[in-house]
Amino acid sequence: MILVTVGSSADGFNRVIEQVDGLKGEHKINDNLVMQIGHGSYIPKNADRFFRFTSWKEINDLHKKVDCVISHAGAGSILTALAHGKPFIGVPRLKKLGEHTNNHQVDMARVLVNEGKMLMAGDKKGILDCISKVRGGWKPKSGSTKNMFSKRVLKSLGDFRFSGRPKICFICSSGGHLIELLPLGEVMKKFDRFWITFESPISRQTLGGERIYTTKEPVRNPVRFLKVFYDSLRVFLKERPDAIITTGAGVVIPFCFISWVFRKKIIYIESFCRTYDRSLSGRILYPISSLFLVQWKHMLREHGRNVRYFGQVY
């Protein structure tokens, strides 16, 4: 079975859906084909099953069954496949095609290809070549640092010397940023905590019974940003968290600055997808972060002296 996913981006990702659907229609792949098409406008003609969104539980159940995953090269999609030990074929979104605002998916894919953790393709032929490699026995190299990462973050919380067990706010955008925080959420179940993220079809399904506040994506729009700031202040005054843990992006900026004004601790984790350059939210929040973490050793030199490397979230 082959699973194709495109995440929750507002534009979908028609290119990869069309290409894999075309390979199925041309009988170049005969595997059972399941597709998550998100907000895309292209409707598959040859897939055995497709859906726009489903529960986080079903996504994990599908990953357990499939032989490989084909997706955009988003951090959430890659990390989910790696967590299940499944071969991952990434088709990065490209800036020149208007599929993203930058080419960080290409950068991340190249690093992971060099580490033997994924395969990368750009067109139908490339996808077919990658599928052939998987059929020939290619598997991603194993190795996870998530346990070390979680333990060191927990130790850092202890080093802040709260008077009691701190209340934690996990805040991030949806998609990959949210997926990256889930392992930390698992090890902090004993803490009083809550989540803030974007309104999306999968956010509440992913977080299950957690206490969640949702807001709109600011999309670098001043009016929308003011609305997010108001929502952030309202939630902060209601919850009064002791520490904020975040992987970015835009939604986190007003909440973190409000928290900083009230002298709360901020742990900023630069996203797994940032392999060569700094994120905008990372650049803005670095000066006010109590602990600033990167997930790639070579990124230590990109921010400044107060950056730490604890491994990776998965």
Image (spheres, rainbow, N blue to C red):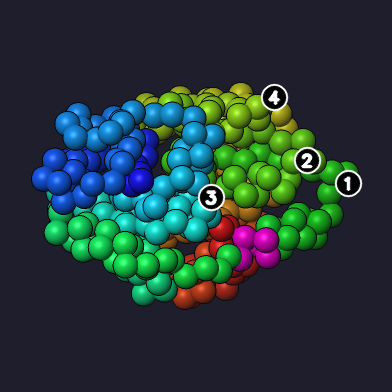
| Residue 275 figure quarter | bottom left
Q: Which amino acid type corresponds to the residue marked 3 in the rendered image?
A: Glu
Q: What main secondary structure does the magenta stretch of the protein show?
A: helix
Q: Amino acid at mark 1?
A: Ser
From this view, report whether residue 87 is shown above or below residue 23: below
Residue 201 location in percent, x, y? Answer: 43, 26
Question: Is the residue marked by circle 2 packed among few (<14), some (14-19), or many (20+) residues within 10 Å?
Answer: few
Q: Tell me where the magenta segment starts and ends, as one range.
A: 145-149
Q: CA distance from mark 3 to mark 4?
A: 26 Å
Sequence-wise, the earlier of marks 3 and 4 is 3
Say whether disc 3 or disc 2 marks the residue closer to the N-terminus.
Answer: 3
Residue type of the residue flagged with mark 2: Phe
Expressed as whole percent of the image width and height from the top left, the position of residue 149 reads 65, 62
Mark 2 element type:
loop
Measured in 3D between alpha carbons, the distance from the residue under mark 3 to the one under mark 2, in whole angstroms, is: 18 Å
State the SS at label 3.
Answer: helix
Mark sitting earlier along the chain (1/2): 1
Badges 2 and 4: C-beta atoms under 8 Å apart? Answer: no
Q: Mark 2, mark 4: which one is toward the viewer? A: 2
Q: Quadrant of the C terminus?
A: bottom right
Residue with the mark numbered 2 = 191
Amino acid type, label 4? Lys
